[in-house]
Image (tube, helix red, strand yellow):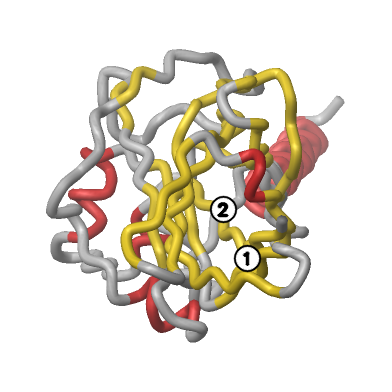
Amino acid sequence: MTKKAQSLLLITLCLVMSLTAGVLSCTDHDIENPETACTRVDGSPRYYTCEFEIVKAEFTNKLSLNEVVATVTPMNRKVNIPVSAAWSYYHPSPGFSDITFKVLLHIKRVSNPSISSSNQYTIPFLNSGTKNMDASFALYQFPPIFPPLSQTISIATGETFVAVVDAFYHVKEDILPGNKAVYSDISGNTAFLIYNMKTATVLSASPYSYKHVFDLSESHIVIEPTIVE
């Protein structure tokens, strides 16, 4: 083979290798793991990949954690919750009730933490307080004034952790003929969040300056409850 032919062959091989590398690079960049894709409330990508997905929230019968009476998922957040399943129920004033349920949050790890937190996370419960859910949740501030105790979630990617939490509701109670109770004016829609406090603290500060708590959390689930007898 002449030197000229050798040079042409070498150039051709280099071009093929460069093109192949370019295709691989683009492929790796463009295709995301759908489980770890993470967007903000406005639809833009979150700077740090979300660590978790709250797969579902299960309301249990009183303190019987193995007896589920109602289930909420991110795609089906409307739920009827029987008041008989409450583990705490009392009347703070005539015609009103304060009702608390035990809830099992199924939390799946979908990505490793972007900022290490020694596996310590907080899981606050938020109440929208009004029917304008989006506006109400946006009013919550970070960090929370009274943050819940941190929880350890030390699981590998793809594994699921179950957190036992409380859901509290203040409702108006009317007694109809036949001693039938009807519950209305429930204290808004509610949500559970999971924070990696270190990641949320970074995202809430400059240059990111995220304000909405849903953007700061690693995952959240919204519940639109109806209390029934």
> Looking at the image, can residue 219 be seen?
yes
User: Which quadrant of the view contains residue 24?
Assistant: top right
**From what the image shows, is residue 170 above or below residue 25?**
below
Q: Residue at x 15, y 60 (%)?
A: 205
Q: Position of residue 120 (x, y in %)?
A: 29, 24
Question: What amino acid is labelled 2 in the image?
Answer: Ile
**From what the image shows, is residue 164 above or below residue 40?**
above
Q: Residue reaching furthest front?
A: 178
Dot 2: element: strand
- Which labelled disc corresponds to residue 162? none
Question: What amino acid is labelled 1 in the image?
Answer: Glu
Q: Which residue is under mark 1?
A: 224
Q: Position of residue 216 (x, y in %)?
A: 34, 56
In the image, 221 versus 9, the foreground residue is: 221
- Real-space Cα separation, disc 1 to disc 2, in angstroms: 10 Å
Q: Residue at x 39, y 56 (%)?
A: 91
Q: Residue at x 54, y 69 (%)?
A: 173
> Looking at the image, can residue 4 be seen?
no
In the image, 5 versus 71, the foreground residue is: 71
In the image, 199 versus 170, the foreground residue is: 170
Dot 1, crowdedness within 10 Å: few (<14), some or many (≥20)?
Answer: some
